[in-house]
Image (spheres, grey):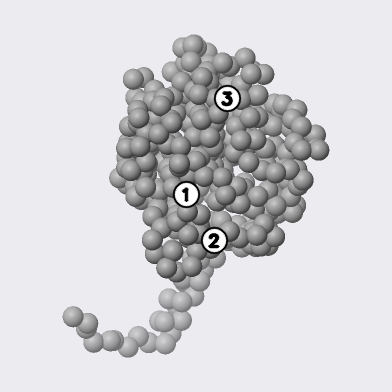
Amino acid sequence: MIGKARSVPFVRCCAVVAAAALLAAYSSPSVAETVQPLGVDLERFEYPWPVETMAVRIGRSDGHMAFMDVRPESPNGRSVVLLHGKNFCGATWESTAKALLGVGYRVLIPDQVGFCKSSKPEDAQYSFAMMAHFTRALMDQREMDEAVIVGHSTGGMLAMHFALMYPDAVDRLVLINPLGLTDRMAEGVPYVPLSRLIEQERQTSYDSIRQYQLDTYYHGEWEPRYDRWVRMLAGQYASGDAVAVAQARTSEMILTQPVSQHLERLTMPVALMIGLLDTTTFGKGQAPDDVRRRLQPIPSLAPAAAARMPNAELITFPHLGHSPQVEAPDTFERRLLEVLSD
C-alpha cells in the first residue's frame, strides 16, 4: 500500500540535497582532482616485488613483457602462474601471492603484452594465442616446466587457451570468475569495429571505472581499498592513447576468439571459483535488446561449463562478486590453498 505523501520544508530539502552532493563529491571524486598520469607502462606505479622484463618481438616491433618472479623462503617444489584480468595488473595479485609464498609456492606474475607494465604495440594483432605463447616463453626462460595456472576474468579465458595449447605445462587450472564460458558472438552479440571500440575506450575516466566496478564487480558495496586499483587503471588511461587502443584490441579479442567450444578438452584438474554476486556479462553493452535479455552473467554460466569439463570442481562464494581475491582475500586464499593441497 502506498502511503500519503508528506511535504518537506524547502530549507530541509535543500540541506538534504546539499549534503548528498557533498557526500557524492567525496565518495566519487572527479578525474581532474584524483588521477595522476602513471605512464603508459605504469612507470610511476609501484609493484610489491622487483619487476623484470623479457624481450619479445611483436609483429614488426620490439617490446618487452614485464613480470615478477617471487620465490618462497621454504620452497615446496611447486609453482603457480597468476594471470590478471583486463582491468587489473600483476600487482593486484599481491595478497594472493603472499598467501602462496607462505606455504612454499614459487609465484610467477606476468603483465600480459598490451597491459600494465608491458609493451603496447599498436601494429600487433592481439590474440590469446600470442599471450599464451609469450607466457610459455616466460616460463621457459625462468626454467619453470610446469605450474598451477590461475586466471581471473579475462585472465581465466587466457588460462583456458594456454591449457589447450600447452597441456603438459599445466599442473591444474584455477579459473576465478572467468570470461569465455560461452561464445557471445554465437549468442548474437554483434561485432563492433575496432575504431568504435577505441573511441569508446577514450571516454574512460576514474568515475566510469569506479562506477562500473561498483555495479558489476562489488554488487554496490565499495571499500576505500578498491580505489588503489581504480587509480592505477585511470592513471594509465590518462597517460596516452596507446592504453585505449590496447584495451579496445583486448575487447575485440575477447569477442572474436572464443574458447568455450573446447571445454571438454580441458582434461586436467580444474577449479572454477565463482563469486555468485558477479553481474559481469561481456557483450551486453553492444547487444540489441532482444539479445541482451538472453545473455547470462558468469555465475549462471559456470555450472554448465563445469559439467562439460571432465575433471572440474565448482566452488562458489555466495556473498562475493567478480573479484573474490580482492573483495575477501582471507576467504578466497583459504579456499585456494585447500584446492591446491588436494
Contact check, label 3 and label 2, Cβ < 8 Å:
no
Q: Earlier in the sequence, mark 3 or mark 1?
A: 3
Along the line of sight, which residue is nearer the eye, 17 or 42?
42
x then y, percent, for residue 123: 77, 45
Above or below, 13 against 127 in this view is: below
Secondary element type, mark 1: loop
Whole-number angstrom distance, CA of label 3 to CA of label 2: 36 Å
* Residue kind at label 1, given as amino acid type: Asp
Whole-number angstrom distance, CA of label 2 to CA of label 1: 12 Å
x then y, percent, for residue 114: 67, 42
Mark 3 lies on residue:
108
Question: Foreground mark, 3 or 1?
Answer: 1
* Residue kind at label 2, given as amino acid type: Pro
Secondary element type, mark 2: loop
x then y, percent, for residue 332: 38, 35
Mark 2 lies on residue:
190
Q: Residue at x 59, y 39 (%)?
A: 128
Q: Residue 62's mark? A: none
Q: Residue at x 35, y 28 (%)?
A: 311
Relative placement, left or right, of 177 versus 317 is right
Above or below, 124 against 185 in this view is: above
Q: Give neighbour class at mark 1: few <14, some 14-19, many 20+ (Cα, 10 Å).
A: some
Q: Earlier in the sequence, mark 2 or mark 1?
A: 1
Mark 1 lies on residue:
183
Q: Residue at x 34, y 20 (%)?
A: 342
Q: Give neighbour class at mark 2: few <14, some 14-19, many 20+ (Cα, 10 Å).
A: some
Q: Quadrant of the N terminus?
A: bottom left
* Residue kind at label 3, given as amino acid type: Leu
**Count of labels in the image:** 3
Question: Foreground mark, 3 or 2?
Answer: 2
